[in-house]
Image (cartoon, rainbow, N blue to C red):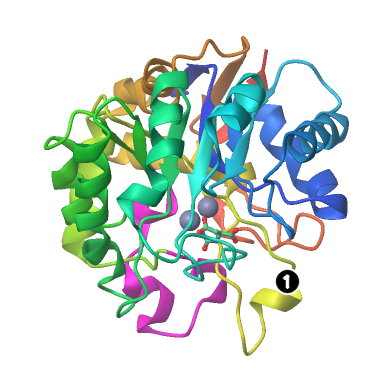
Amino acid sequence: MKSITLTMPLDMHLHLRDGEMLETVAPLTSYSFSGALVMPNLVPPVTTLDSVIEYKKRIKHAIGRDDFEPYMTLFYQNYTRPFLESVQDEITAIKLYPSGVTTNSEGGVSSFDIESMRETLEAMADLGIVLSVHGETNGFVMDREAEFMSVYEMLASNFPKLKIVMEHITTANAVEMLDRYENLYATITVHHLIITLDDVAGGMLRPHLFCKPIAKRPEDRAALLKIALEAHPKVMFGSDSAPHPKHTKESCGCGAGVFTAPIALQLLCEVFDAHDKLDNLQAFISDNAQQIYGICAEYKEVVLVKQDFVVPEMYGSVVPMRAGETLKWSIERVD
Ligand SMILES: NC(=O)N[C@@H](CC(=O)O)C(=O)O
Ligand SMILES: [Zn+2]
Ligand SMILES: [Zn+2]
């Protein structure tokens, strides 16, 4: 039977939430990943040293094992240099949300004024704190990411020593940016390698595939697939697994977010295998991220085999992508 062993898989963009939801979803990721970059868009967002320390404790408690590292983030505000010095040992990145563009982003940045951001971004560059960005404007939904490219250019050129990660990229425009600025990197989700807007809204409306940024055109997906399959050294896997309870997805005001944490590795094997590129999955799932973030992940080996896996209908209160469907790959064991 066809199989692959992945060492130290990392998910460099993950929503773990809090409370009961955290208890449900955190073990699903820690089972098969060595670590994850944990997003700070709680209510209220994670903005203080105490809140990041306390949140990390709750995550570790929910996980209950030592072979998984939650890499913590703060919610971007214009922080002072002394504050950043005091918090640098507790965080890996600071996540910037433009105000109002996605789930729990209301407290985000409302104008990209370089001068008011300068102290924070220069200090981050000096301290080696990565800037992670949800790159969308408030424009027309299909154009939001493309319109944000000028902000990435402004940030990348004004702060050349700052590492900037374009999170969950969905367009060919973002792919082009990667090779244009040395300090720009990107995460790619598994769902954006698989779906386009057609899968979300082209037939019956599929609320469990609705997320921000919305899935785009076939040519955008093709551009993402190309750099993921070749494991371009500036891209890494970030699931953007974003759990919402079933009743808030299957409702007349469906929240944005696709839940993929427990099926991400199986789906990635399916995609890479279908293109005969399984050999590049290790770099995409771990090596590139370790290089980009300069981290040394907890040791873990995940053996996947080409054997059917029926995705559960629910994990707690959450419906995963592909619920009830059969995937071609499954996790055989984790060592
Ligand atoms: N991706 C999403 O659609 N939703 C995320 C927020 C985000 O990453 O933008 C969430 O927190 O639910
Ligand atoms: Zn986002
Ligand atoms: Zn996200």
Q: Is residue 72 visible?
A: yes
Q: Is residue 329 visible?
A: no
Q: What residue is shown at x 43% (from left), y 37% (from top)?
A: 119
Give the residue type that dot 1 points to.
Lys
Question: For this view, does 169 lie left or right of residue 294?
Answer: left
Q: What residue is shown at x 83% (from left), y 35% (from top)?
A: 54
Residue 38 percent coordinates (x, y): 62, 39
Q: Within 8 Å of ligand 1, the CB of disc 1?
A: no
Q: What secondary structure is found at the residue carrying circle 1?
A: helix
Residue 213 on the magenta span:
no
Question: For this view, does 145 lie left or right of residue 85?
Answer: left
Specify the farthest residue to the bottom: 252
Rendered position, 223 above or below 288 = below
Question: For this view, does 56 lie left or right of residue 12?
Answer: right
Residue 205 on the magenta span:
yes
Query: 10 Å neighbourhood of mark 1: few (<14), some, or many (≥20)?
Result: some
**Front position in the image: 4 or 158:** 158
Residue 335 percent coordinates (x, y): 67, 12
Residues rendered magenta in the picture: 188-212
Rendered position, 250 above or below 306 = below
Residue 187 percent coordinates (x, y): 38, 40
Residue that numbered label 1 is attached to: 246
**Front position in the image: 187 or 266:** 187
